[in-house]
Image: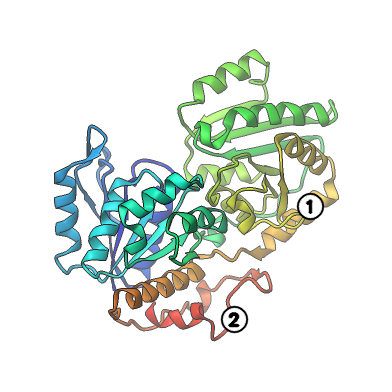
Amino acid sequence: MRIAHVTDCYLPRMGGIEMQVHDLALQQRKAGHDVQVITRTAPGAAGEDPDGPTVHRVPGLVDGVPGVSMRLALGRLLTDGQFDVVHAHASLLSPLVWNAGALASAAGLPTVLTMHSVPPPGVLLRAVGTTAGWTRWKVRWTAVSQVAAKPLRYMVSGQEVAVLGNGVDADAWTLPAYPTNPDELTIVSVMRLAQRKRPMPLLRTLAAIRRQVPAHVRVRAIIMGEGPRRADMERALRSRGMDRWVSLPGNCSREQIRDIYRTADVYLAPAKLESFGIAALEARSAGLPVIAMSCGGVREFVRHGVEGFLVDSDAEMATVTAKLLTSPTQLRTIREHNASTVPEMTWDHMLQRSMAHYARAATIAGTVLPSMPTRRLPPEEAPERSAHPGLLPAAGSADDAAGRLL
């Protein structure tokens, strides 16, 4: 199958959408599909990844407005018959994606549009969606979580919005068991250091945790990532004397993150407008208990008291974290569960889910996608860890039937 992924943001820019689109494209290529990416993100100095998908970098915005050159380039790519399906990855401010949705819908090209952020609900957004014609598009609307799907359903009133979550290579994140040292505890988090992710409140939460953990216990915290609030965080850490035990190593590769997770004890996800939380899913796959806000998309893969805890405030996050860090038996129980239980969002499962939505998009567009033989994992590639009962689709389900497209 010939698949076009359309995203305003892509590598070399780092972020959740960027990495998720890249990983999905790689997984689909491994399954035998012809996959290309269309983006308005400029290339990096190192050039394109030779092992990655073909990338079309179209002209961007002119004074913040989609330029004619962008629309023309996008139109040429989407309407010349070189793709069987379009998968567009949106946040609210995604001019390339919204233009792609309009063009692909008008051309009768099967299109899945996935919302990766949490749109704020409101009458104005519904008016915007109606004015833009979103409710008339013949596309398959999806969102990465129920949290992101709810406001999108309001925006595209009358259209069905399904959940198509992100994927994770759970086996790649599997780490050997690490014996917890009750006298030295490590808290980790990975985020873009931007207001939306709430890095400054995280510092206050860490300070509260430190006060609630016995003074003789050494606590350290590592916040990985970069962003516009870094300088503010550095000043705050120095002024509060927290720079002795809280570090900001900046952007880290996946290998570096895994190395840090090897000796970590708990992962914190402080964002309240978290549409999914791919970094939290990776930490959970590595065996770390995840403590996150209950209002975010992390609840798609973290159950309270099982894979971690869901809290309603920063104060509760601090209290629950301190209690968990000082309860070795409970900490070990959650770690062992996470390390031995595969989350639902493995790539093999999510590829089937994607194909099911592509087939649904073709039905909406009034066409049929080319079929491909089912991809079967050889025994040596099959995951050894057991899946949590009830999470994977039962035989005969829509997800299972979509396997024939892989």
Disc number lying in front (2 or 1)? 2
According to the picture, the residue beneath numbered tag 2 turns out to be: 394
Image position of 293 (left or right of 96) = right
Q: Quadrant of residue 157?
A: bottom left
Q: Residue at x 52, y 74 (%)?
A: 380
**What SS does tag 2 mark?**
loop
Q: Amino acid at mark 1?
A: Arg
Image position of 129 (left or right of 79) = right
Quadrant in which the N terminus is drawn: bottom left
According to the picture, the residue beneath numbered tag 1 turns out to be: 332
Image position of 142 (left or right of 244) = left
> Marks 2 and 1, how far apart in space?
31 Å
Q: Can residue 53 be seen from the camera position used here?
A: no
> At which x and y percent is residue 87?
34, 62
Q: Nearer the viewer, residue 44 or 403?
A: 403
Q: Residue at x 56, y 58 (%)?
A: 146
Q: Earlier in the sequence, mark 2 or mark 1?
A: 1
